[in-house]
Amino acid sequence: MIRPISGLGSFGVRTVSRFGGMTIMLGEFFYALRKLPRSMPLFVEQMYQVGVRSLPLILIISVFVGAVSAWQAAYQFKFIGAPLRFLGQAVGKATVIELAPVLSALVFAGRVGAGITAELGTMKVTEQIDALESLGINPVRYLVMPRILACLFMVPLLVTFANFISIMGGLVVSIIGVNVSSETFLFGFRDSFKLTDFLAGLTKAAVFGLLIGLVGCYEGFRTRGGAQGVGLATTTSVVTSSVLILVFNFIFAMILFRL
Amino acid sequence: MNDDATHNLIEVQQLSKRFGEQVVLDQLDLTINSGDSVVIIGQSGTGKSVLLKHLIRLLAPDSGRVLIDGEDITDLTFEELLPIRHRFGMLFQSAALFDSLSVEENVGLGLKESRHYRANEIHEIVMEKLDMVGLASAADKHPSQLSGGMRKRVGMARAIAADPEILLYDEPTTGLDPITADVINDLIVELNDRLKVTSITVTHDMTSAYKIASRIVMLYQGKVQFDGTPDDIRSTDNPVVQQFIHGRATGPIQVR
């Protein structure tokens, strides 16, 4: 009787202290931004590591996201008897508002968030982070700030790329599989496209990027133990940022897309 | 402070630290004079490394304080700690080399990030320090290409790169074969003599302790159990110390 209640309580305390710790690290991140010129080479390196090297993965998932959304939209249209000339509208809206930002962010959390936690977690348990401090180097400026900032910049860029590729994927499926001409599809897409939707998607992407970088660094820095600890921290990092992405996405939906 | 040859460089006052339920340091007092070569011995888990990390505030105490030249470092910010940390160099237990950087970059990183040196000056200093530890030829290698003893020596070169006054060695010979361990011991003695530094070494290797120490401090149950010269420790009748330095499983120290 007592055990489940105390278990719930200790889970609550741990969760609150975790988000408290993340908030502190977020503050340290913003404070360290004033040293950005000094960390410029590290920032550029991280942009390459987290951004450019994620391109192939984002390319592959985007092709299939676009393809399946065109296919499923056509299937639903057939079911409710809607005309197929609206396929471009449906795929375009869904991609720009939801699919590209959310799915890219989730995949990015799995690739980049996990990588950041594993790297920083290993540095933590092998005392490399202590060694940085002993040399008078601020680990937040040297390790955390370039990584979070790179995620913050690169996720919106990757989402822009994902938007384009997904629409192309949808176009190919609509021509080959659904028998909707490219003129009809693209007319529908252009007809429904709103710049504010696109910018809302990018705003979400930037926040998701910040979350992934922050959670990745935070979990890395609080890693304890050896290889097992690093594995655990990496799992926690991906799970936490994935959940946060979906929660924040719903909050964004309520704020940005009023009914 | 009036006698410049030896003064109270480091004062640890009533230092307590616990991790969860486990009390690691319990109101520990310790004073270290400049020029000392102090070796801190004790069983694994008695808080030797924890004590060492408090001296440069890599860990913050639960209560008590650490004074460096009379200045309390307990509540300093990162920026305020910088001048204190620049007076220290530390060799970590597993050397803690940055695996993404070459040996030369590892040794020079602190100098580079301090922005007080030009690139060619850094190169000269790094090569000089690497030469002191006998590894000038390994400058372009990466840590993964080095043996355990070589990593420790690179770690030493990195610790002395900015010419610190105080060197902290965390288990410098642990995990090394006896011959390599002796090379490290010789190196510590040589650096202490040549650089005129104060050194604090944490170890449970008594061979190493006798070789390096001008003073040996034994920690037991979070407190200082013994404090004296190597000759004092050999002749003491303190049963706890006797059990430890002779490595006996039976005695007052209970092995959990």
Image (tube, coloured by chain):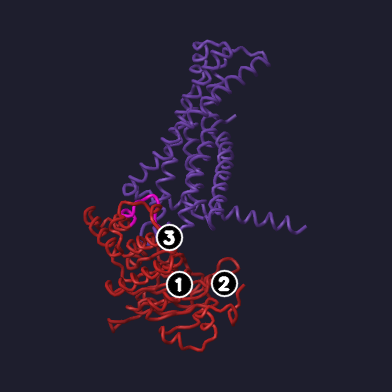
Chain colours: A purple, B red
What is the x, y in percent for residue B228?
43, 84
Cα separation, mark 3 vs mark 1, equals 19 Å
Looking at the image, the residue that sits furthest to the front is B179
- Chain for mark 1? B
Q: Kindly identify which residue carries mark 2.
A: B23
Q: Which residues are magenta?
A: B95-106
SS of the residue under disc 2: strand
- The residue carrying pointer 3 sits among few (fewer than 14), some (14 to 19) or many (20 or more) residues within 10 Å by Cα, namely many
In the figure, is residue B202 to the left or right of A246? Answer: left
* Residue B203: mark in rendering: 1
Q: Kindly identify which residue carries mark 3.
A: A130
Residue B101 part of the magenta-drawn span: yes
**Displayed quadrant of residue B84:** bottom left
Residue B174 part of the magenta-drawn span: no
Q: Please tell me whether residue A28 is drawn above or below residue B2 in the rendered image.
A: above
**Displayed quadrant of residue A179:** top right
